Image: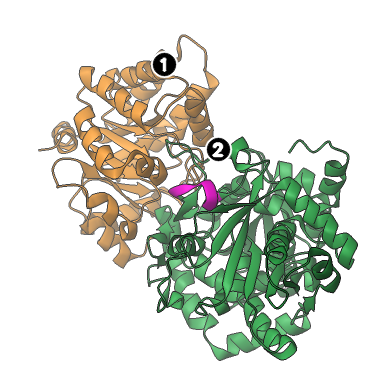
Chain colours: A orange, B green
Amino acid sequence: MTRIEQSFARLTDKGEKALVGFVTAGDPDMETSLSIVSAMCENGMDILELGVPFSDPTADGPVIQRSSARALKAGMNLGRVLEMTRQIRQSSDVPIVLFSYYNPIMAYGIDAFYKDSVAAGADGVLVVDLPPEESDELTGAWAGGDFSLIRLVAPTTPEDRMQMIAGGASGFLYMVSMTGVTGSGGLDFTQIGEYVDKLKNSADVPVCVGFGISTPADVAAVSGIADGVVIGSAFERTIEENEGSADLPAIIGKQTAAYKEATRG
Amino acid sequence: MSHTGSSQNVQENTDFTRYPDERGHFGIYGGRYVAETLMPALLELNEAYRTHVRNPGFQKELYGMLKDFAGRPTALYFAERLTRKTGGGAIYLKREDLVHTGAHKINNTLGQALLARHMGKTKVIAETGAGQHGVATATAAAFFGMECKIFMGTEDIRRQAPNVNRMELLGAEVVPVESGTGTLKDAMNEAMRYWVSAVRDTFYVIGSVAGPHPYPAMVRDFQKVIGEETRDQAVNEIGRLPDHLVACVGGGSNAMGLFYPFINDPAIAMTGAEAAGTGIESGKHAATLGAGSLGVLHGSKSYLLQDQYGQISEAHSISAGLDYPGVGPEHSMFKDLGRVNYVSITDDQAMAAFYELCRTEGIIPALESAHALAAAIDIAANAPPDRVIVVNLSGRGDKDLGIVAEYASGSEDG
């Protein structure tokens, strides 16, 4: 059983939903970023999505775009993200999913990326601009194993395509809650519920919902309909607002605990 | 002028028109590298492109607009005084500067806006660098009565103020983009980001042979009218096909438009002129094919300007329209196969060619086109008098007069 599968199995036993936390690796710098992740783990985060900063994050909103810019300015690159992964793994069993655009992975080299990610203790990757039609090049280098390629499904995805994507999914499915970039507002929980139901009919893996979720009340609502909730921009907003404060990891820790509480139904 | 990397290893029987394949690949380039939210829209667009654009009724409607509204065909003009002054081969100009809105961009925007109308979309968005694509999109949107938003970097808004005024007069909303260096790449990021949110009722009019499939093929097909006319005009007016075609390459749409109808004629040489800015070695340039490497940006795989970690580098050119770190995927394939020779032209070389055309022919070219002219003058100077060289004069230079004035006063920082 993979670390991701173990995580969901444990949560099911406890009657909880998964809290998936996204932060950009190295924002605002590697040391602070490690303390932030540590605080998230200590306060109940179930799965970590570790963002690989990219200069042109077209699928993300301005908050995550700025977080990427801060991390790049602090000297982050994919190699250092993997180094950070290795350091997190020394003190935590939390499943780590790398969240990246395709270009940094191509520049690193696909074979080397796969090998080094596994060696660092990462559990999977989500490549935001790599639809299934183009992913053979990436998956061709993988000999199977425990490293998951997390797939995205959007509200614009028609049902037959949804089935195609769900059929090839591993780890969990990331269901985008709205047509928009990360950090946009305005959620329709009824509609999200309908999408999740449809998706769960085709999928053998858990379904997590993300984009635009920012308050514990949002988390509670999504926990009622999906297997997990992804929070990204809301954490990054906190990092941005408290940059330079010694309390930043503690503030993120508190925020994580509030979200986690909301996943307990 | 530095020659970059053409190996001239084309096989005689290569059929260049069989690309892209059904998933939009030009060899290893092209494809669709976008967020899942956009995939259904691209699949829908591809279907519409295949059904509507190939339809004779659509083509008739489009060619009617190109003739009566855009002012096609444009002249193929023998630049006699420039030829005499240069010495060597005969320089002809394909006068896209004479078309409505002053640049080749209108060919594509009328095509895409017509397609948008056939698809039932009521809103269009576009990105723009120099502003010519923005003006052409705003024009097409006004023609069809569509709502229009144009994303433009704040630096380009500063550099291309007259075009901002034109877009607003035409009823478009110009959305300033402050991220990055406030140029074309950033405008394209923002347009894609907006499109993700508005994909259900909004058509994204991409201005070059770049972006995810089907844009590179579709924009090429809307621009190939340039080369088709050139073929007919060369045969009728010169009595034979040209020997050498020259065009500037930022994203590469005007070059593709001129080249494509000749692409399977192996005897016809082709040169694409990229912007070398203040020199490739200075690092301030936009020579993607000359100095770039394989990567993925804005939805397709192509040559890119990037660092060793896959972060996109800022491009630089005196011409806002060439200031882009990517290039159309089909050009990347042509480079690898040696079908087109790509060269790089510095800001200074382009400015010299700009002044030369103004003074010898009474034509003020766009700074983009001045890069092609600089390459063509060099080619002509080394060619025999019976060699026919056609340069795509892709646009007129009115929009660039502010930059020219800055350059002349020495305040342009390069």
Front-lying residue, B292 or A150? B292
Image-quadrant location for residue B143? bottom right
Q: To which residue does mark 2 refer?
A: A62
From this view, report whether residue B102 is shown above or below residue B111: above
Q: Identify the residue at horizontal 66%, vertical 39% (top origin).
A: B178
Tell me the tag on residue A32: 1
Residue B385: give x, y in percent of width and height: 73, 75
- Asked where in the image residue B98 lies, by quadrant, the reply is bottom right
Residue A184: x %, y % from top left: 51, 42
Q: Is residue B300 left or right of residue B180?
A: left
User: Tag 2: Cα neighbours inside 10 Å, few (<14), some, or many (≥20)?
Assistant: some
In magenta segment, residue B292: yes
Q: Which residues are magenta?
A: B288-295
x 71%, y 90%: residue:
B236
Where residue B159 sits in the image (x, y, percent)? 78, 46
Q: Secondary structure at mark 2?
A: helix
Looking at the picture, which amino acid does disc 1 mark? Thr
Q: From where the camera sits, is residue B62 visible? A: no
Q: Is residue A84 left or right of residue B295?
A: left
Compared to B226, does A228 lie above or below?
A: above
Quick one: which residue is furthest to the top in this view?
A: A246
Instruction: Tell me the SS state at disc 1.
Output: helix
Quadrant housing the C terminus of chain B:
top right
Marks 1 and 2, Cα distance to the nearest angstrom?
21 Å
Residue at 70% x, 69% y is B391
